[in-house]
Image (spheres, rainbow, N blue to C red):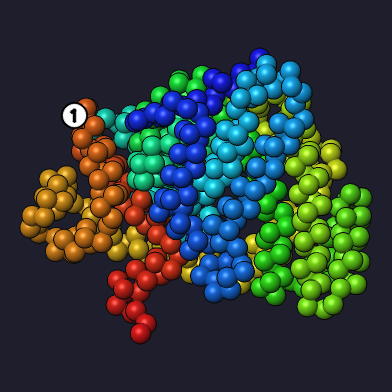
Amino acid sequence: MDDYSKKITTHREFYPIEDINISIESDRGRILSSGAFRRLQKRTQVFALELNASIRTRLTHSLEVAQNARYIAKTILQNLSKEELKQSGLDTLKDAFISISEMTSLLHDIGNPPFGHFAEQTINSWVKNNFLPIFNKIEGSSELKKLLAADISNFDGNAQAIRIITKLQRLNLSYSQILAVVKYTRGAWEDKPGKEDKLNYLKKKPGFYFSEKEIIQKVRQTLNTALYCRYPITYIMEAADDISYLSADLEDAIEKRILTLDELYNLIKNECKKENEDYLLNLIEKRYKQAKESEEPYRFNMFFTLFRANLIGDLVRYVADIYLNNRNEIYNGSFNAALLEFEKNNRYYKAVKILQKISQEQIYKNRQVQELELQGFTIINSLLNFYKPLLELNSEQFSALLANKKISCFVSERLIGRISKKQITAYKDDIAKIKDYGNFELQERYFRARLLLDYISGMTDDYALYEYKTLLALQLI
């Protein structure tokens, strides 16, 4: 039996607010006012360092996802009877249910590094090739060393979001809002599950780091969420994100002249006929015909306005039905699938796969997009190399450096001043909590690596480029 009064609560780390509605509004204000949220306006969605303001950034994408999540949440509530709302405790939590869905969607990309998901791979490759050889030479427990090495080698935007919320920005969000952001349910130090695991989908990627293990455990226990299970509203955020991608990236590709409207129409039409998929075919033919009747400058806008409205409306109603038809599993967090991908034979699922395939082949593999990814690789990789001397110091040297004392590495003395004080404070707080002094050196170096990754991954695209040029002494005037 689902009882959302146990999931949507006023618990938070400091200064809890007794009134649930005021508590939720407080979360909204903290999120919208945070620097990490504002920085999304200068982060890549698909096209890095884009000058055309109509092309989506992580911020504009997140706003669209939040709107979709709000729509899904309201549809779910509208489809519940008065008796069902009362039994589930949602009769008095409607506003909170909608707001958490919306705010979680605004936060879902907050941990993504500059230059998109390719940067995650770049960071992890650099850590394995450059930091682990240093880390593995430190004496200490082999078991702990293996755990921390695995964790630091699995940088992920989802896990970084939890670190930003709880440690770097110290937003002091309600536990309900924090847990809703945990999209995947295993720690970054844990092995990827096999196909036989009943929760393998929920654990397919890291959801949080070892550094945030304790706070996640506390939040889970407080909200009665079993190990490796997901918070129910997270399913809504995920569906809203999946729906948003379907038309947004294609629309941007036309704006960028990677595709024309006619080319996109023909691609979708041909793929639908090949897959014998009528729903999407009928939708695009109807909207394409209407668009062609418009004046030339407005055809593109007309097509996407109508196409997007129809597609989102249909998919929102569909995922709301999936949510309600699987209420118990979703409430318990053991529903091991994305809402949009649950019914493999459904016409909407087939339509989604067609649109995803076209985006993959025509956009993500496009030469222009891949060149931007390679530029991002060069910038991120170079920045990590520039700051590598900070990781080569022993703990005494680094402690002296933070205390503004002279050390033998003059490069490190200059590099440390460029790192944010908030990030350094988070490092100091983590170090202060170390209790296993026999393995202090291992843990200190792990947290120092976290400090560097916090700094680099927290940059916007343009600031990363600026920092790269500055440290190369090639800044353009």
Find disc 1 in the rendering and name its residue.
Answer: 438
Is 384 left, or right, of 234 in this rendering? left
Direction bottom: furthest residue = 477
Image coordinates for residue 45, horizontal then vertical, percent = 57, 60
Image coordinates for residue 154, horizontal then vertical, percent = 44, 44
Q: SS of the residue at dot 1?
A: helix
Q: Residue at x 45, y 65 (%)?
A: 461
Image coordinates for residue 356, horizontal then vertical, percent = 73, 53
Image coordinates for residue 136, horizontal then vertical, percent = 29, 42
Q: Residue at x 53, y 62 (%)?
A: 44
Which quadrant would the N terminus be assigned to in this image?
A: top right
Is 442 left, or right, of 152 in this rendering? left
Q: Is residue 306 above or below residue 151?
A: below
Q: Is residue 87 above or below residue 105?
A: above
The amino acid on which the numbered mark 1 sits, given as a three-letter code, is Gly
Q: Residue at x 28, y 55 (%)?
A: 420
Which quadrant would the C terminus be assigned to in this image?
A: bottom left
Q: Quadrant of residue 433?
A: top left
